Image (cartoon, rainbow, N blue to C red):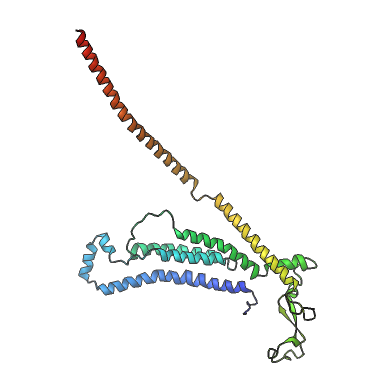
Amino acid sequence: MEECAHAGCLMELCIQLCITMLGKQLIQNNLFEIGIPKLKKLLRKRKSEVTSLQEEEVKILKRYEKDHFLGPFAGINPEYMEMIIQFGMVTLFVASFPLAPLFALLNNIIEIRLDAKKFVMELRRPIAAKAKDIGIWYNLLRGLSKVAVIVNAFVIAFTSDFIPRLVYQYAYSPDSTMHGFVNHTLSYFNVSDFQKGTAPLEPMHLHYKVQICRYKDYREPPWSSTPYDLSKEFWAILAVRLAFVIVFQNVVMLMSDFVDWLIPDIPKDISLQIHKEKILMVELFMKEEQGKRLKPAKGHLCRMVWSYTAAHISLVKMSC
């Protein structure tokens, strides 16, 4: 297996993310946002071959007729997908490249203006449609945020020296310092144990015969009863790494749930306004119901008064 560089796997991942966020997101995507619509518009103009007389006619056309010459609206799924990929790159590997959120913010500030210009001036106006939220994209973002916690926990635990340093400082260091940490991480190898055909071609390049080599790993020395097997330090560090992953995951999940509970999805003033609107709607509904009930009651009362008046007149006539 190919090992990481001397600076560690985090440095290699940091370089890759830096190239992705700066080169692809900030430069390449934004250039495409500007260049591709301009190129398509130029090709449509050349295909149509609009003359000067036709240009005068086009100026007289109405707004919806002019919009027909713009590019067709292909939907917002590509825009959502670009944001999902960016969110995944930022959250999944933020431990190795902490500046990724800053570059993502700068990219989004530029892109939101480019998208506004593209949707207003380069594309036809999309058909409006009601939507309660962003749909399945919210579930994807929420799932990515959960996976990002686990991925960052493993990145910190297994691709950095954070856990081995803590274990050495609190379990193996004689003076509770980092003095001697490098020597602790190196194992011993006897050059006589090289397999046939794998020994160095020039064993005397240091002008003396090397008997013992050191390499970065936690293995038993060649003079032990189980030479080159995984040592107790390796299993201790592995246990601490797994424990760190579990603790980190649960702590971050609890903190995210607490922040989610602390900051409501709907601001307080908007929720109060919605509550007042609901109360007004209920009062209006109750007034309409009361009005419907009073209408037949008033008609019945008029009929009773009319019948009483008619009976009184007949009694008066009879007495006369």
Residue at x-position 77% and y-position 81%: 222
Could you tell whether 302 is left or right of 139 in the image?
left
Q: Is residue 159 left or right of residue 30?
A: right
The part of the image, by quadrant, that contains residue 203 is bottom right
**Considering depth in this image, is 7 or 251 the residue closer to the camera?**
251
Is 216 rendered above or below residue 83?
Answer: below
Could you tell me which quadrant the N terminus lies in? Answer: bottom right
82 or 54: which is nearer to us?
A: 82
Query: Which residue is pictured at 30% across the width and 26% down the height?
Result: 298
- Quadrant of the rendered image containing residue 290: top left
Q: What residue lies at 49% left-to-right and 67% top-to-bottom?
A: 85
Question: How many callouts does the rendering have?
Answer: 0
Work out which residue is located at the far top of the displayed protein and give it: 320
Image position, residue 10 (x, y; %): 61, 71
Q: Name the quadrant containing residue 96.
A: bottom right
Q: Outermost residue, front direction?
A: 318
- Which one is nearer the viewer's eye here, 318 or 121? 318
Above/below status of 121 relative to 187: above
**Quadrant (top left/top right/bottom left/bottom right) for the C terminus:** top left
Q: Position of residue 165 (x, y in %)?
A: 71, 68
Residue 5 location in percent, x, y? 63, 77
Horizontal side of 128 relative to 151 (left or right) equals left
